[in-house]
Amino acid sequence: MMSFPAVSATVTNKDADAAVLVVVEGESRMEVAISAGGTESICPSGCFITTPSGDRIGLQGDETIEIVNGSAVVK
């Protein structure tokens, strides 16, 4: 049996203040706080996130996202 490394989206907060994202994976909903300049890995199986500015974005789990002025920039 082969195992593959888990892939997850990487979110970096470029703002001067902490950012709180609402992450929804299936039936599970949680808030993830990312400190100013901090980076978190989220959504290994895909999810929806809501940013501080209210943007709602669907992720597959392999994206790189930056929070800039409360909005998500997907790279």
Image: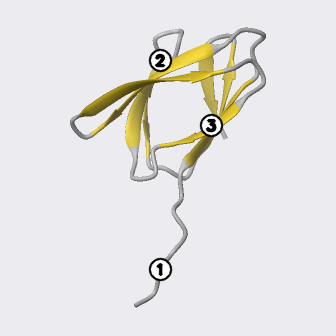
Which tag, 3 or 2, sits closer to the chain's start? 3
* Front label number (3 vs 2): 3
Query: Residue 3: which numbered mark, if any?
Result: 1
Residue identifier under label 2: 55
Report which quarter residue 25 is drawn in: top left
Query: Which residue, as the protein is rendered here, is positioned at the far bottom?
Result: 1
First-in-chain label (2 vs 1): 1
The answer to whether 52 appears left or right of 74 in the picture is left
Q: Is residue 10 above or below residue 70?
A: below
51 relative position to 70: left or right: left
Residue at 50 percent of width and 21 percent of height? 21
Would residue 48 be found to the left or right of residue 53 on screen? Answer: left
- The alpha-carbon separation of the residues under discs 2 and 1 comes to 34 Å
Front one among 73 and 47:
47
Which label is found at residue 39? none
Q: Secondary structure at mark 2?
A: loop
From mark 3 to mark 2, how far is it between C-alphas?
18 Å
Q: Write the residue at 40% across / 90% down.
A: 1
Residue behind mark 3: 40
Looking at the rendered structure, the kind of residue marked 1 is: Ser
Mark 3 and mark 2 in contact? Answer it, CB < 8 Å.
no
Say what amino acid the circle numbered 3 marks.
Glu
> How many residues crowd around disc 2 within 10 Å: few (fewer than 14), some, or many (20 or more)?
few
Where is residue 13? Give x, y as percent: 70, 24
User: In the image, which is nearer the foreground, mark 2 or mark 1?
Assistant: 1
Q: Residue at x 53, y 59 (%)?
A: 7
Query: Against 51, is 61 above or below?
Result: below
Q: Quadrant of residue 64?
A: top right
Q: Quadrant of the C terminus?
A: top right
Q: Mark 2 belongs to which amino acid?
A: Asp
